[in-house]
Amino acid sequence: MTINRRQALGLAAGAVAFAAAGLPGRPASASPEETQKRIAEFTGGKTPETGRLTLTAPEIAENGNTVPISIEVESAMEGDDVVEQVMILAEGNPNPDVAVFNFSEASGIAAATTRMRLAKTQNVIAVAKMKDGSTFIDQKEVKVTIGGCGG
Amino acid sequence: MATPKPRVKLPKTASAGEIITIKTLISHQMESGQRKDKNGDPIPRQIINKFTCEFNGTPVFSCDIDPAISANPYFEFNAKVPESGTFKFTWIDDDGSVYEHEAGIEVK
Amino acid sequence: MRNRYAIVGLGALLAVATALPAAAEPVDDELVIDGQAMTVRTAAPEGHPFDELLSGWLFREAETRELEADSFQNPGMLYVDRGADIWNAVDGTMGKSCASCHDDAADTMKGIAANYPKWDADAKRPINIELQIDKCRVENMGAEAYKFDTPDQKALTTYIKHQSLGTPVAVDLSQGDLQSWWDRGKDIYYTRTGQLNFACASCHEANSGQYIRADHLSQGQANGFPTYRLKQADMVSLHNRFRGCIRDTRAEFPKAFSDELMALEVYVTWRGTGLSVETPAVRQ
């Protein structure tokens, strides 16, 4: 192949520009503002605290179609110390909603694992709501790579 | 895939009050509603929008699901087992179909 | 759409050609599935261009590797389950299922698929699992051959190959005329094709271990097919993958089970001699 580095970079840049120029019908991505709105609705306007809730997600997802995520909240899951819900949001997806986990005392532990879709590199956010009304938040940035090989 | 088929994994026995881990997987395309077909027409959304787990009629865990959950949805969670009984798992499809699975556990 | 991908693809391939990124070593990890250790590294057979053969599993990220290692979480197992149902389902005019003749696949199919492709003396060409299923369906069940890549074909193939999980791949080239098909497959493997002028060997031999954009190039082994691919969130058959690779070079791609792709299957399968059958493997 007799294309030098500069030409190659030019072609690659052209490809990026072409992609960025907009594809008909490609869904717009959710905005961080929209995500913040979802969080406010979920917490009733409270600013969630950090700590107690841990979101685990890979730093780099090999394919954005199937990204494993886990959440766990420190809680006795008895009496007043019960986690009621944990909401998962993805601020760079076409729609930020991913899932809401509903726990009960019968859960024993407030932990869950699932697999999710990420349209691009973005922040994944988890927000927990406790029975006593307190709320917690954690977030992780997941880099989504784009492989060279379709098929 | 044909009719979605659930897979569920949990222990057959537990001690009273033990917290066990439950894993569930079901075959489902989870069509997001964001894709287009070859003619450029949108493919309508069809996902499993709700998953629930009950033990002897008591809610243990449930999940409200959006299209961002991957195809063949997987959920792993825990349950505190007070007595012998039956776990009932339910997946609800956008088209109204309900897929169910039951698994017993014996407290020793 | 198609043009965009083509241009982006070209940019990616040129990036490899012009500014070779640092190679990353495949991981040093052991694959154990339900207590059974898989051979993911083995010495190459005589006449092989590599010294050591590596499963594609070693080229994947930790989360993808874990998914294959857990036979419950592996979504490919959904297809194994479905394949088991098909195995036992009566189909065709003769009122028979696979199980009518072959009983319990766990016994009768154990290790069998590790020795495919075989020589089909009737057809005078190699036969793989998909074609063997079709032959059985047509001749012994009075059923129709599956259309390529129908979910039932993929599920039944996955189920049958899964009965060989852990068995080392071993193709017997002394059968019939299989050696000449191996020779032809080797020619195809090294023949540059398409507008990008790439051979199989360009990526999977000369640049194995390098990155093509974000894809860590493996040795292109066939031992895990049909494989659950995260990109499609579906099972991908070997001939689908062959066609996808050839299409990525921007060439016309041959039909599934054509002479070209059967020859390639014989040769590529041999290139993985000694690696465990991993079906259903999980790849990116």
Image (cartoon, rainbow, N blue to C red):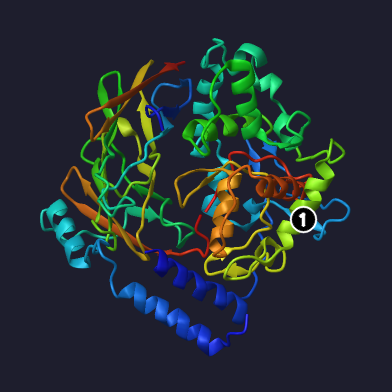
Q: How many marks?
A: 1
Q: Where is residue A81 drawn, in percent x and y?
A: 24, 42
User: Camera-side residue: C21 or C184?
Assistant: C184
The quarter of the displayed image where residue C226 is located: top right
- Vertical comparison of A129 with B100: above or below: below
Residue placed furthest toward the front: C123
Q: Residue at x 64, y 20 (%)?
A: C139
Q: Which residue is mark 1?
A: C186
Three-letter code for the amino acid on which mark 1 is drawn: Lys
- Vertical comparison of C124 with C52: above or below: above
Q: Where is residue A41 drawn, in percent x and y?
A: 12, 54
Mark 1, Cα crowd under 10 Å, few <14 / some 14-19 / many 20+, is many
For the N terminus of chain B, the image quarter is top left
Q: Where is residue C96 drawn, in percent x and y?
A: 57, 12
User: Camera-side residue: A49 or B56?
Assistant: B56
Q: Residue at x 41, y 27 (%)?
A: B5
Q: Residue at x 38, y 40 (%)?
A: B73
**In this rendering, would C189 be left or right of B96?**
right
**In this rendering, would C167 be left or right of A14?**
right
- Vertical comparison of A8 with C210: above or below: below
**In this rendering, would C94 be left or right of B49?**
right
Q: Residue at x 63, y 80 (%)?
A: A1
User: Camera-side residue: A150 or C23?
Assistant: A150
Is any atom of residue C161 visible in this view? Answer: no
Is any atom of residue A27 visible in this view? Answer: yes
Q: Secondary structure at mark 1?
A: helix
Q: Where is residue C204 drawn, in percent x and y?
A: 68, 61
Q: Chain of mark 1?
A: C
